[in-house]
Image (cartoon, grey):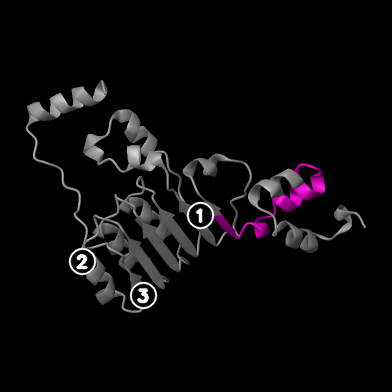
C-alpha cells in the first residue's frame, strides 16, 4: 500500500511522530501530504529554542494549538535583551521590540525572553481565557504588574511559575497567594533578587549618555 492511500487520520498519526523539519520535507512530496501538514489538528504543541524560529515555515499556527514554549538561551539575550532599557541604543530597542503575540493557549512557557513585558502577559491572559499554566523564567522586564494581571484576568489559571525574574517582589507573590489561593504558585529566586533601578539623572547627563550610545 502506498502512503497516500492511507486516510487522513492515519496520516496525521504518522506525521505526529516527526519533528517540524521532517514534517515540512514530507509535505513537499505531494499535494495530499501538504494538506495533512496544514491540518491544525497536527499542531497542538509547539516548542522553539529561539525567537528566530518563529519566522520559519516548518509549522502551522492554528486553532488546535494548546501549548507553546519559547525557551531562549543564547549569548544574544545577554548582549542585547538583558540590558536595562535606559542603557539600550535605538538599534537594540528595535531588536527587543520584535516579538509576536501568542494564540489561544492552555499552557505558555517563556524562558530567557527578556523583551517580554507585563503588558504582553496581560494581553495574553485577556485573550486566552482557557490558559491553565503560565511559566516565566529569567524574563527581566516582568514585574509585579504581570502578577496583578494573572490575578485579574487568569480566570482558569491552575499553575503559575515565576523563576529568576528579578523585578518580581515578595509583595507581588503574596498577592497571588491571597487573591488566588487555588493557584499552584512557584517562585525560584523571584522576590529575593536585586531589582533593576534607574539612577537619577540630570538633563545634561541624559543628553550626554544618549550621544554616547549613538556612537557606541
* The furthest residue to the top: 215
Q: Residue at x 53, y 61 (%)?
A: 67
Give the x, y percent position of residue 16.
69, 59
Q: Nearer the viewer, residue 96 or 48?
A: 48
The answer to if 40 sits in the magenta stretch is yes
| Residue 178 location, quadrant | bottom left
Residue 112 location in percent, x, y? 38, 50
Q: Range of the magenta residues?
A: 27-46
Give the quarter of the figure containing the N terminus.
bottom right
| Residue at the spot 39% in from the left edge and 40% down from the top edge | 75
Q: Determine crowd level at label 3: few under 14, some 14-19, many 20+ residues with C-alpha closer than 10 A.
A: some
Q: Can you give x and y, in whole percent of width and height, for residue 206 in the image? A: 13, 30
Gap between marks 1 and 2 measured at Cα: 30 Å
**In this orientation, which residue lies closer to the viewer: 137 or 93?**
137
The residue indicated by pointer 1 is 103
In whole angstroms, how far apart are the C-alphas of marks 3 and 2?
Answer: 16 Å
Q: Disc 2 marks which residue?
A: 170
Rendered residue at 80%/43% (across/down): 29
* Residue hosting label 3: 183
31 horizontally vs 192: left or right: right
| Disc with the residue nearer the chain's start (3 vs 2) | 2
N-term mark: 1 or 2: 1
Mark nearer the N terminus (1 vs 3): 1
Amino acid at each position: 500500500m502506498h502512503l497516500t492511500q492511507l486516510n487522513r487520520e492515519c496520516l496525521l498519526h504518522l506525521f505526529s511522530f516527526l519533528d517540524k523539519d521532517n514534517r515540512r520535507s514530507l509535505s513537499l512530496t505531494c499535494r495530499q501530504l501538504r494538506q495533512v501538514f496544514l491540518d491544525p489538528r497536527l499542531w497542538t504543541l509547539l516548542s522553539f529554542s529561539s525567537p528566530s524560529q518563529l519566522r520559519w515555515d516548518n509549522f502551522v499556527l492554528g486553532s488546535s494549538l494548546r501549548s507553546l514554549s519559547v525557551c531562549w538561551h543564547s549569548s544574544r539575550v545577554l548582549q542585547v535583551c538583558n540590558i536595562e532599557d535606559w542603557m539600550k541604543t535605538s538599534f537594540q530597542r528595535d531588536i527587543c521590540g520584535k516579538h509576536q503575540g501568542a494564540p489561544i493557549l492552555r499552557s505558555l512557557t517563556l524562558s530567557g525572553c527578556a523583551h517580554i513585558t507585563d503588558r504582553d502577559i496581560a494581553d495574553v491572559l485577556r485573550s486566552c481565557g482557557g490558559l491553565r499554566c503560565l511559566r516565566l523564567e529569567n524574563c527581566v522586564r516582568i514585574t509585579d504588574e504581570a502578577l496583578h494581571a494573572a490575578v485579574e484576568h487568569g480566570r482558569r489559571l491552575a499553575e503559575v511559575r515565576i523563576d529568576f525574574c528579578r523585578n518580581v517582589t515578595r509583595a507581588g507573590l503574596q498577592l497571588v497567594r491571597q487573591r488566588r489561593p487555588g493557584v499552584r504558585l512557584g517562585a525560584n529566586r523571584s522576590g529575593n533578587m536585586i531589582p533593576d533601578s534607574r539612577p537619577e539623572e540630570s538633563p545634561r547627563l541624559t543628553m550626554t549618555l544618549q550621544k554616547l550610545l549613538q556612537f557606541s
